[in-house]
Image: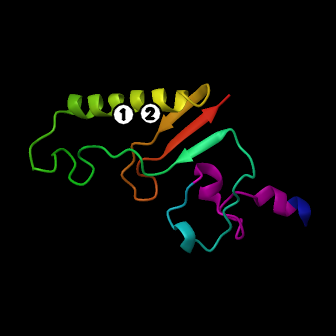
Amino acid sequence: MAEHLASIYGTEKDRVNCPFYNKMGACRHGDRCSRIHNRPAISPTLLLANMYQRPDMITPGVDAQGQPLDPRKIQEHFEDFFEDLFEELGKFGEIESLNICDNLADHMIGIELVTAL
């Protein structure tokens, strides 16, 4: 029995643990999810949720005033945000990696993963 449970852990066949949360660290169902979200007790990774939002997040391709946005401006906005965040977090220690999700799905908007050495 233990071998069977070990073989399905973290897969869709696992009806106890959330496989999406195990892979991504976030679940589209949030607290309403019927499965368990196993959060690590300690980790060198810091999750910062909902920090980054693209200028065209609500209406892709246009800004809040309805003006078309140049893709270069969106990229520049992202790079400025990345640089500012990296510099601010670097004040607290050495950063191994910084990943920012540019995702439009509600459960993944603006998630930053920071791994420290």
Q: Name the mark on residue 81.
A: 1
Q: Residues under labels 2 and 1: Cα distance? A: 6 Å
The residue indicated by pointer 2 is 85
Q: Between 30 and 92, which is closer to the camera in this rendering?
A: 92
* The magenta segment: 4-25
Q: Between 106 and 11, which is closer to the camera in this rendering?
A: 106
Label 1 packing within 10 angstroms: few (<14), some (14-19), many (20+):
some
Q: Residue at x 57, y 29 (%)?
A: 97
The answer to which image quadrant residue 12 occupies is bottom right
Residue 44, horizontal then vertical, whole percent: 68, 38
Q: Residue at x 9, y 50 (%)?
A: 66
Q: Is residue 103 magenta?
A: no
Question: How many numbered marks appear?
Answer: 2
Mark 1 and mark 2 in contact (Cβ < 8 Å)? yes
Label 2 packing within 10 angstroms: few (<14), some (14-19), many (20+):
some
Residue 107, horizontal then vertical, whole percent: 46, 58
Residue 57, horizontal then vertical, whole percent: 27, 50
| Residue 13 versus residue 45 in the image, above or below | below
Q: Residue at x 71, y 43 (%)?
A: 43
Q: Amino acid at mark 2?
A: Leu
